[in-house]
């Protein structure tokens, strides 16, 4: 039985338009799962808030202290802002600037503990893959992924695979484990997109990056996943896998130029759950609430072997119809955003840029 970790803290409207995170995300995915009848209470766990001792297992104590101060005072001195980038670079100080990332960290660490003896956990509130030891980055204040993987390592696991399918390179996680051969990190992301890292492989450090071109389609995803990504994971013989699916590589996302249907994310989750006794699936990026919630609800169904209906039942359709989305597409959403969960497949040619990528 797969478990789902959530929290009401994700319902707090802490970001304001035009910030990309000023949309419903993890909580909407949870609501959609409940509206589908897929999330009984027996499978739900409430995320705890990580304490200072938990967080400083990866982050510098002075940085965590600055986050706590920023929440308490809703400001930071200019020198602290400049050093820690809290309140800078689209990382705004907000009323839950410490509690919210501490809760996502607590949720991912709980997921690692719940799978200590095996199992599957979905924690869509987690997935802050840009967070650095002493710096906020890319909307990420705490690197909950690094903390979750570290929890597995502390349990004695020696072979962990991390797969990042977010449209943005998972730079924070790669940096965190660059010198740890126990952790295989793989990132598939849009070439040239912020943070503009992840341009090459580092096999000696178990780091593999696949920067893909704009308009990356389902056929190209299948080509790389089947010929490169799955073989790398299988060769690592993982005892545990952590997947960051994201939702910003999907065709309807406003923050990237990739063109995947959500079928690719479901295929990845379905394949990975067969490869290790422990699987934790997080959330990650995604800035269209309709496509994000539909994709993550489908992932939850996939993890539980639940058939996905072609048409949404009325309660689920009503859940999506009530979404507030400040971008132009939110005023007149396409019909399939409100009536179905699966996207239509988006096949296409496998272009030379993909065919020429180094396959292991």
Image: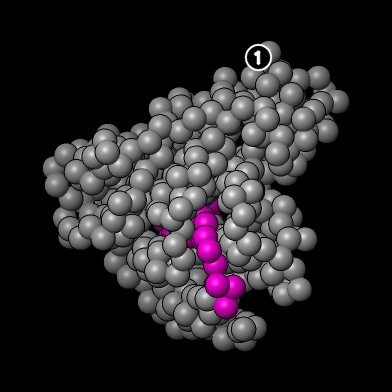
Q: Is residue 174 above or below residue 32?
A: below
- Asked if residue 356 can be seen in this view, the reply is yes
Please tell me which residue lies in front, 240 or 127. Answer: 240
Residue 119 quadrant: bottom left
Way the structure is coloured: one colour
Q: Say few, some or many: other residues with alpha carbon within 10 Å of mark 1 (under 14 / 14 to 19 / 20 or more).
A: some
- Residue reaching furthest to the right: 79
Left or right of residue 348: residue 38: left
Please tell me which residue lies in front, 192 or 79. Answer: 79
Spot occupied by residue 217 in the image (x, y as percentages of width and height): 45, 72
Q: Residue at x 67, y 63 (%)?
A: 182
Q: Residue at x 46, y 53 (%)?
A: 117
Of helix, strand and loop, which one carries label 1? helix
Q: Residue at x 52, y 76 (%)?
A: 234
- Asked if residue 197 can be seen in this view, the reply is no
Residue 179 quadrant: bottom right
Q: Quadrant of the C terminus?
A: bottom right
Spot occupied by residue 354 in the image (x, y as percentages of width and height): 57, 81
Q: Residue at x 29, y 66 (%)?
A: 344
Magenta region: 235-257
Left or right of residue 87: residue 83: right
């Amino acid at each position: 039985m797969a478990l789902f970790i959530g929290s009401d803290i994700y319902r707090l409207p802490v970001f304001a338009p035009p910030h990309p995170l000023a949309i419903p995300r993890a909580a909407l995915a949870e609501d959609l799962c409940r509206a589908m009848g897929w999330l009984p209470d027996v499978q739900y766990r409430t995320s705890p808030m990580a304490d200072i001792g938990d967080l400083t297992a990866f982050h510098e104590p002075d940085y965590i202290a600055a986050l706590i101060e920023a929440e308490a005072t809703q400001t930071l001195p200019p020198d602290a802002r400049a050093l820690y980038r809290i309140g800078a670079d689209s990382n705004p100080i907000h009323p839950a600037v410490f509690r919210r990332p501490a809760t996502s960290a607590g949720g991912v660490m709980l997921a690692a503990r719940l799978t200590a003896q095996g199992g599957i956990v979905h924690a869509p509130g987690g997935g802050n893959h840009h967070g650095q030891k002493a710096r906020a980055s890319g909307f990420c204040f705490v690197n909950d992924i690094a903390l979750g993987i570290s929890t597995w390592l502390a349990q004695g696991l020696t072979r962990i695979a991390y797969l990042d399918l977010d449209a943005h390179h998972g730079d924070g996680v790669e940096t965190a484990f660059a010198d740890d051969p126990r952790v295989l990190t793989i990132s598939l992301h849009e070439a040239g997109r912020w943070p503009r890292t992840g341009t090459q492989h580092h096999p000696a450090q178990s780091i593999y990056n696949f920067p893909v071109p704009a308009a990356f389609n389902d056929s190209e995803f299948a080509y790389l996943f089947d010929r490169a990504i799955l073989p790398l994971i299988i060769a690592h013989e993982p005892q545990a896998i952590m997947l960051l699916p994201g939702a910003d590589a999907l065709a309807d996302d406003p923050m990237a130029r990739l063109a995947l249907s959500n079928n690719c994310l479901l295929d990845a989750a379905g394949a990975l759950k067969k490869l290790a006794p422990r699987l934790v699936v997080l959330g990650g990026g995604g800035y269209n609430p309709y496509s994000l919630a539909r994709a993550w609800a489908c992932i939850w169904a996939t993890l539980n072997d639940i058939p996905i209906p072609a048409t949404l039942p009325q309660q689920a359709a009503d859940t999506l119809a009530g979404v507030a989305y400040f971008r132009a597409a939110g005023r007149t959403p396409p019909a399939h955003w409100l009536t179905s969960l699966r996207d239509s497949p988006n096949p296409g040619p496998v272009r030379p840029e993909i065919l020429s990528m180094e396959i292991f």
